[in-house]
Amino acid sequence: MDKIQYVGEALWIGYLCKAFIIGGFVAALFSAVSYTFSSLGNPTQAPTWKRLGNAGFAVHALLIISLLGLMFYAMVEQHYEYSYVFDHVSGDLPMKYILSAFWEGQEGSFLLWMFWHLVIGAVIISINDKFKLEVMAVIMVAEIWLNSMLLGIYLPFGEDLKIGSNPMMLIREITLAPIFNNADYLSLIQGRGLNPLLQNYWMTIHPPFIFAAFALSVVPFGYAVAALRKGEYQDWLRPVLPWALFGTAILGISLIMGSLWAYEALSFGGYWAWDPVENTSLVPWIILVGGIHANLIAKATGRAIRSTLLFYLGGFLMIVYSTLLTRSGILGDTSAHAFTEMGLEWQLTFFLLSFLFLGMALMIWRYKNIPAPAKEESIYSREFWMYVGTLVLFFSALLINASSSLPVLNTIIRYFDPSYIGRVIKDPIAHYNKYQLWISIFIGLFSAITVWLKYKNGEQVKAKWMVPIAIYAATALLLTWLTSLWIQLPEWHYLLMGATAWFTVVANGHFLWHAFLRNARAMGAALAHLGFGIMAVGILASGLNFSYLSNPFVFKGLFGGEGDEEKYIQLIKNKPLLVKDYVVTYEADTLIGKARHYDISFKQLGKDSSQRVFIDSFVTRPNAVYSNDFSKIAAFNPDTRHYAGKDIFTCVVSLPAQVADAEQAKLMEDSLKYAPFTALKGDSIRIGKEVLVVDGLQYPPRHEEFKNHALDVGFEVAYHIIDENGKKEEGQCAIGLEGSLMYKFAGKHENLGWRVRPSEQLLDQWLSPEDQLDYSVLSIKKGQEISWQGYTFSISGFDKNVDTSRYKVEKGDISIMGLVDVVKEEKSWLSKPIFVLRGNAPMSIKDYLIEEGLHIRLSAIDPATGTFELKVAKDKRNNPGFPLEIATNVPRSDYIVLEAKIFPGINLYWIGSILMMTGLLMAWWFKYKENEEWTSAS
Amino acid sequence: MNKTTLLALIMIVAAGVIFMNASKDVSTYSNFREADSTGDRVKIVGVLSKSKPMEYLPEKNPNIFKFYMTDNKGEEKQVVLAKAKPQDFERSEQIVVTGTMKDNQFYADEILMKCPSKYKEEEITLRKGS
């Protein structure tokens, strides 16, 4: 078979991308080796190696940025021949989501991570620091690994052994499909586009932050490696600190963003779920926070240098571990987050192991040389309690990591013993909360008692320290008592957590004020610890005390435990439901883009509910997002009403099957049994206890769908139904034609469970086909009146704007729309027939008066005499009836199932966590300034 | 005994106690028979019995969804889930439920489903209208 010459492929993009990827990999390798030799090799050659290292970095950076630019170009230009473009872009994807589409895939996110390494590398090269070459060597080794993820080289042995996955492969190279036998396949395909769940601004801002944090975590690792290799354990403690502070702040901000994303835009129903994916990002943060504290101790006292090294090495290792976990699919059914597998598990494992080995080997090699003072610290020294605090952080990280790593352990054991049955945590949220509660208690305690302690000189502050601590403790107890009046703290350990949280809020609050007046540089730490305390109170309020707005009438006692709680409420459209002290109504739904928004009105009754006075009312608009092809609902997004003291969170959790899924809708429609009935105008049809009365043809139409559907011709039948109590319900159904397609629009009666629609015979009885019409010709002049079969016709004018659904203007057409007044007795209508000259052939587009069954054409115009020729005909409506079809016992489709949750004090959680990060950023800024002053002074 | 040793000792004891305790939160995946005989709260892996009826009647109780599941041992039981019917439930390939067995029914309050990836179908999407 001849090789197919494909049409429209831009092959140069793929070739260039491949060249950039391989070139970038080689340059990173070259740079890393050069940087390594610049510090390991002969000192006289060091400057040359350094230059080579920098040159390698520059080439690598240039190639990677070119790759980013070219991939971006391919995505913007929609070159669907490339797999990455095909997988993440589609024609209807708004440009504002192109960045999100870029890092939706694993390859794109690896590139984002690499990009930040380049920025950090450029900064490090430009600073004056004696550790920088070793740090650069480490960054470049990380770059080699990340770059290798994109190589896409298949090894000749083994079946699936490949190194990396090149995002810019041609889809016809990686997918076998008959469509690729067509040389012009590109004109037939469109991209899959961005997952609708990810089409929001969070997906635009969250990944750059989290990957910046990932990239920043390599710097403390690099400094630790540098210190160990050089055997210089003091000097690195100063320059590494601002990097660690900044990186930790960025990682923390990313965590808060993720938390906000989950709470504001996803249906998780909370801000933290102890999901393995969340945990594996939290663990490196905790480790890095431990590292910062050890670093501060080491810098001030010379103690805890080994801990500092271990924490900083561990921070980046945990980042890589988290990458391995989330991208390998190993978390499987323990995580709610979906991740696609890329088949790079082994490569990621070796990435992790190589850095683990590097850190461990250096640590073991140098362990004995690392200075550690033999003299004990005083129990009244700051470093003692700070150090205990770092151990608490280490414990916290260890516990979270051990529990989240169960799937990894299972996989490893199963590798040796395939019959092994995996272990799981029965109730993850309860499990994590139980232990982390104690971590919070200890952190609160230690961060409060250390505020007035000083480094080294312990005993002398003892007396001065006792009094303020006692006052803080007393204040904290008072605040805890007040808190227990506001929210429930049902068990003693919750009270303890509240008390220690307030303890640190009070102590650090006072210290913050003190620092503000005397030493602004100490404010960062105080603010961060204050923020931690506020966050802990916020967690007790919102996490422990959230409640469901649910219907109390649903039967209880089924589960005999926590499962008893009623969580959801069913809301039928326009039927108010009293839920606790709220009157909740599902009022409307509107389709905007791919999302259907539901208007849910909440009206809160006053304390005296008998008076029916509403003290508050608001509307929330949770939505349901359709899949890209509109065939079903892909996701539900919540909407939250915010107050200072609480949030009311609402999210749709279920829709009727026939609303949520087009397939189900068809199944349901097919299962309905329509029974035929024929009635004349005014006749009634009895079905069960209800009576349907036909009111006749209705014009103008009122049926929502029918009104919005431009048909050639259509009839709407009005009727009303009287139920057993004599209640009247109006309705209308319609039938129409568009070309040869017939459309039926049923009247829906959700309360009765009825569907009413016209039968096809209605068209036959009311509308005569064109070939059976007997047209009369009427010659008429403007202003003249002509009578025909009891109607009076006159032409009142013309309209050159002939833009109607009946007629599409083609190029060269000469067209005119007549305005014909038709009068019969008291009634009158305005008819708009159209006359068209296409080429030299005259055409007439008829207008149809539904009520009278009149077909009116403007068939000729004689400009010389000013005479117009009208052709009119009337339907042969021989006593037409209204043949209808009625289905009963139709399932409701006008309801939603809603989850409404009240989170008290959730703002304390947000404020606290934001204060923590602000504190970290402040600390970073002051340490950075301090560093600069030190560098310029020395 | 100096403070460092004491501290290390406290930490080791604390670690021991915590891990002993935490191991109680961990279990293997169980099955219906085991859950019935022990009465414990367990996690069970299984697949939806697609031929058996599912029941979700929000007008009666939006918090209860009933379906039949076949566990790894091939035993089929009705599961009473204290949640709304999850989206795309019919398409699930695997289900993990957490709860207890009572009167021949499994009362669950947690569910995790594994679904075939929704957006990565191995087919080429044809451009609309051509």
Image (tube, rainbow, N blue to C red):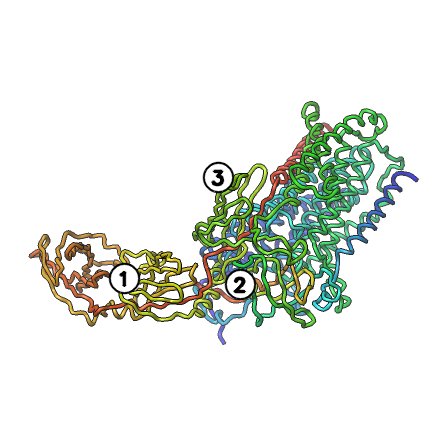
The residue carrying mark 1 is A696
Specify whether A294 is left or right of A195. right
How many numbered marks does the figure carry? 3
Give the image location of residue A25, x and y in percent.
64, 54
Give the image location of residue A400, x and y in percent.
73, 50
The residue carrying mark 3 is A613
Would you say residue A135 is visible in this rendering? Answer: no
Q: In which quarter of the image is residue A564?
A: bottom right
Query: To which chain does the residue with label 1 belong?
Result: A
Mark 3 nearby-residue class (10 Å; few <14, some 14–19, many ≥20): few
- Which quadrant is the C terminus of chain A positioned in? top right
Q: The residue under label 3 is which amino acid type?
A: Val
Give the image location of residue A575, x and y in percent.
46, 52
Query: To which chain does the residue with label 3 belong?
Result: A
The first of marks 1 and 2 along the sequence is: 2
- Front: mark 1 or 2: 1
The residue carrying mark 2 is A170
Residue A547 against residue A661 in the figure, above or below: above
Specify whether A482 is left or right of A670. right
